[in-house]
Amino acid sequence: MTARIPHSALIIVLSVGVLLGFGVSLSVGPAQIGPLEGVKALFAADGSPQAVVMQDIRLPRAILGVLIGATLGLSGAVLQGYLRNPLAEPGLIGVSASASLGAVIAIYTGFSLVFPLALPLMALAGAAVAGGVLNALAGQRGHTLTLILAGVAISSIATSLTSLALNLSPNPFAAMEIVFWMLGSLEDRSMQHVWLALPLMAIGWAMMLSLAKPLDALTLGEEAAATLGVNLRRLSLVAVIGTAASVGAATAVAGAIGFVGLVVPHLMRGVVGHQPSRLLLPSALAGAIMLTVADVGVRVIAPQSGLKLGVLTALVGAPFFLWLILSKRRSLL
Amino acid sequence: MKKHFRRALIVASALVFVVFAPVSGAMAAAQRVVSMNLCTDQLLMLVADKTQIASLSHLARDETLAVMSARARNYPVNHGRAEEIYLSRPDLVLAGSYTQFNSINMLRGLGISVEQFAPVRSLKDIPANLRRIGALVGREARAEALVAAFQSQLAEAQRTERAENVPAAIYYANSYTAGQGTLMDEVVGAARLENIADRLSLTGTRSLPLELLVMESPDVLVTARKTGHPPALAHEVLRHPALRRTIHRQGEVAIHTKYTICGLPFITRAIEMLTKAGDVVASQADSRK
């Protein structure tokens, strides 16, 4: 398939979409604040309730929606390109679940209270362990199917250990919090969370975006890529660490949000074609739009009940997943 | 002399009758009582005689949940399982109305009488529950004395010079608040505070979005005192910068859960704290004028 829209035009359209989504995200919430009033309150320094709501509650939420969506979209595109498997995404290969486990351990051991950076670092460590195991399996010219299966296994081990940790926690709220770590939410996050996640996400993005050329070469097969001068060992290391850093940071502040990383690269592939390098930036932008829209949806559909973000993305994502399997089966026949 | 002795005997026997009459009534009342619920545990300890208590629930010893945790250590503990309770041969079991369905049904099937107590949703229920336990264990006089003490403590806790109600919000872990139909709502009302949950027409225990709380910016924020339990994400919302910027500088009242979790006379302690917090906030507002 060839691109029907020029790449630069697509980037501009998607960027405008991100900005629009960001604006809508800022103007939706249980408190009744008009758009104009909201913009004024965003820059007000008077500490009025409106200013506090806009600056301390809605702004971090909107920023995190964009950052995390971009992270998931980009890492999905990189993983699908690197593994050459349409089902790859950070959730499927166990990176999100392992990051959740790390965060849960940091919180429930009380470690995060003693040392605030423990939370993102443990989430990152969780993601890194998952990445390391995957890398060990992929390094020896791992069959992609083996890798996916290993990812599923890692994912379910991490998920059950997370449940175990919460199950054994004497805190009465622990059971409710399983839901947060498995479905994700941007409810009542603060700027502290933005500053916590942003540096690691940015490092992860830079690593993943640097893979554009090697990923293109990889479409010709590993041997051909190696003859073109691609260092396969380095490629897999950068892909896994980049994903682990950015997704680990995203998960540490918002829990594991599924399906965005899976769906978005497929949607974008229909527009930009199959070249992995052209897929990266559009996937990041479209991921940001998708997550922001989902987060607006969560607030509009059930403002009082605390509907979790992951429920909405999974509701949209799961049928797509089924359709993907069906169409793949057809093309294999 | 003989006459005197006779009279003394009559008086003494009358006294004996008076003193022992309630006790003979108690003979018909339960003598081995098991409680399976944190709240009935404490009601039982308040009203019943030591010798009547066979065992209490294990939660009664938790000092973050039970005001009477120290006294609870004097009694055996049960874990709410039908087997252990049946084996302790109680003649009465006290339980909450929403928990341990299976165990309670099994005990009833085994012929043990089980009395269930619904969660207290109003201050009026507290004297009623004290009297109910008093009748069950044959200690009506003790129950009446406790009711009288509760009512005078309540009046004392509510004493204030303040004319108008101060806006207040109840804000628990996971952003939950308590509105109309909850004991906490009555506690807040009794302290002459105005619960903003009513203004937002939130009834029962409901989630209150942080945004709405910030927009209302009540003068008093009632939170639950941190327990010794390990930290949880649920409490993180109480550290949110938006909350710090609006409410904390004005007056947060952290109340130990143990005073409010059950409808017991100790609730007056919470009312007293809230009345005082309202007074402090109102006097600050006056001095600013």
Image (cartoon, coloured by chain):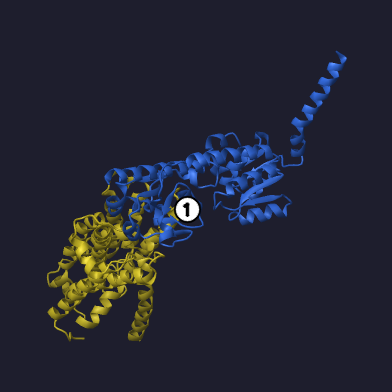
Image quarter hosting the N terminus of chain B: top right
Foreground: B237 or B75? B237
Is A294 on the left-hand or right-hand side of B100? left
Q: Is residue A215 visible in the rendered structure shown here?
A: yes
**Residue A128 position by quadrant:** bottom left
Q: Which residue corresponds to the image point at 81% horizontal and 26% vertical from the top-left? A: B13
B108 versus B32 height, above or below: below
B159 versus A241 height, above or below: above
Q: Which residue corresponds to the image point at 67% horizontal and 37% vertical from the top-left? A: B141
A87 versus A200 height, above or below: below
Is A214 on the left-hand or right-hand side of A176? left
The chain in blue: B
List the single residue furthest toward the right: B2
Q: Using a 10 Å C-alpha cutoff, classify the residue at mark 1 as few (fewer than 14 neighbours), some (14 to 19) or many (20 or more).
A: many
Q: How many marks?
A: 1
The image shows residue A66 at horizontal and vertical percentages of 24, 67
Foreground: A280 or B237? B237
Q: Is residue B66 visible in the rendered structure shown here?
A: no
Residue at which label 1 appears: B185
The image shows residue A9 at horizontal and vertical percentages of 14, 80
Is B208 on the left-hand or right-hand side of A225? right
The image shows residue B169 at horizontal and vertical percentages of 39, 53
Foreground: A79 or A142? A79
- Identified by mark 1, the residue type is Asp
Q: Chain of mark 1?
A: B
Q: Which residue corresponds to the image point at 55% horizontal and 39% vertical from the top-left? A: B152
Q: Which residue corresponds to the image point at 42% horizontal and 58% vertical from the top-left? A: B197
Foreground: B243 or A283? B243
The image shows residue A97 at horizontal and vertical percentages of 35, 61
The chain in yellow: A
Q: Secondary structure at mark 1?
A: helix
